[in-house]
Image: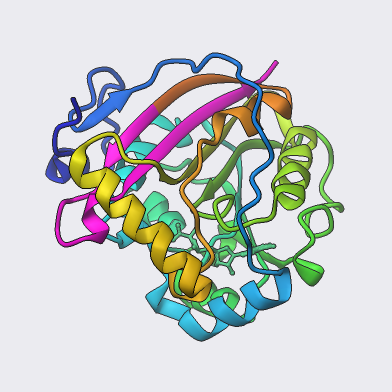
Amino acid sequence: MTARLSLAKFAKAGQLLPRTDIPGCRTTGAPKSEEKSVDKRNVLTREKAREVYDASGRKANDTVSPYGAPASEVLLRIGRFDEAEVILEYGHGTGTFARRLFERGILRPSVEYIGIDQSPVMMKLASESLQPYKQNVTLISTPNGDPLLGTRQLKSGSVDRYLSTYVFDLLSEDDIASALHESYRLLQPDGLLCVSGITYGNSLGSRLACAIWELVRSFNIEIVGGCRPQKLAPYLEKAGYRIKESYIVQGDRSGLLGFMNSEVLIAQKI
Ligand SMILES: C[S@@+](CC[C@H](N)C(=O)[O-])C[C@H]1O[C@@H](n2cnc3c(N)ncnc32)[C@H](O)[C@@H]1O
């Protein structure tokens, strides 16, 4: 059973806690390969997604949301970011996750953080937020939101961590495949893919929250920023990854959004 994640336990600055026995998370182990049927749910076009995230700005900050905050703490803890020389974040949004990495002193002084986003407003917000660390930070705008274009100038195998939180859950099936294809090219052989996103319920409360989310989404996809509950493992496996760690993390239980579950996965190239 999933118990409430104790945020305080993970919030200690500069401290990476042991990676075993994470309270509040149900480990799902390394999920078995399963054939995934194509997701036919409606998605935002890239252009519409840019408009939506330009309009929402600071409000679209999953890293501090009732469902995203606990999952982000888990990812911060298990992503082994302290070992990385080059971290690439796809869809950095306001830059809050990256700022946490820097603020908590988790990163090496020489680390290079490369952020990618297609929203000019998010680029501006992240640039302001990461200003104190600007010597370590490069932000790249994705031309037309094409996951293959923003990073094509980067060398294959040049990245230690490919990080993406609450982005795959809004992309089209084709764009998820392209982003993962590009991540595979960019990651060095021992590098880690670190992803999170909203997922399906596994308790009465989380199933209900998920059903309401899907209902709202079917009426107005923009209200939920295009995001849909997913199981990410089959996408990662299809792209050639082996799942190393997998957690279902429940939200903070504050209000309806806090009953949404998130999935946190760490994967490596086979
Ligand atoms: C739901 S927000 C998540 C932001 C952040 N990762 C977080 O967890 O708070 C999705 C982000 O992905 C960006 N995004 C959406 N489609 C994209 C695309 N095709 N290429 C690059 N970024 C994209 C949006 O602009 C937005 O910043």
Q: What is the quadrant of residue 76 in the picture?
A: top left
Q: Quadrant of the N terminus?
A: top left
What x and y, as percent, mark residue 217? 46, 66
What residue is at 27 percent from the left and 17 percent from the top? 20
In this view of the protein, which residue sits in the foreground, 26 or 111?
A: 26
| The magenta segment | 247-270
Which residue is nearer to you in this view: 53 or 113? Answer: 53
Quadrant of the frame with the C terminus: top right
Question: From the viewer's perspective, is 83 left or right of 200?
Answer: right
Q: Work out whether 190 lies above or below 115.
A: above
Query: Residue at horizontal 64%, vertical 68%?
Result: 44
Count of numbered circles in the view: 0
Look at the image and say whether residue 105 sits in the magenta stretch.
Answer: no
In the image, is residue 46 above or below residue 156?
below
Res. 168 visible in picture: yes
Residue visible at 37% across and 43% down? 262
The quadrant where residue 203 appears = top left
Q: Where is residue 219 in the image (x, y as percent from the top left)?
A: 47, 73
Residue 251 lies within the magenta run: yes
Give the quarter of the image for residue 118. Answer: bottom right
Q: Is residue 64 left or right of residue 85?
A: left
Q: Nearer the viewer, residue 163 or 230?
A: 230
> Percent x, y for residue 254?
14, 59
Q: Most extreme residue toward the bottom, as rendered? A: 55
**Viewed as shown, does residue 265 lie left or right of 149?**
left
Residue depicted at x 80% and y 35%: 185
- The quadrant of the picture showing ligand 1 is bottom right
What is the basis of the colouring in this image?
rainbow
For residue 13, say whether it is visible.
no
x, y (%) of residue 26?
A: 28, 25
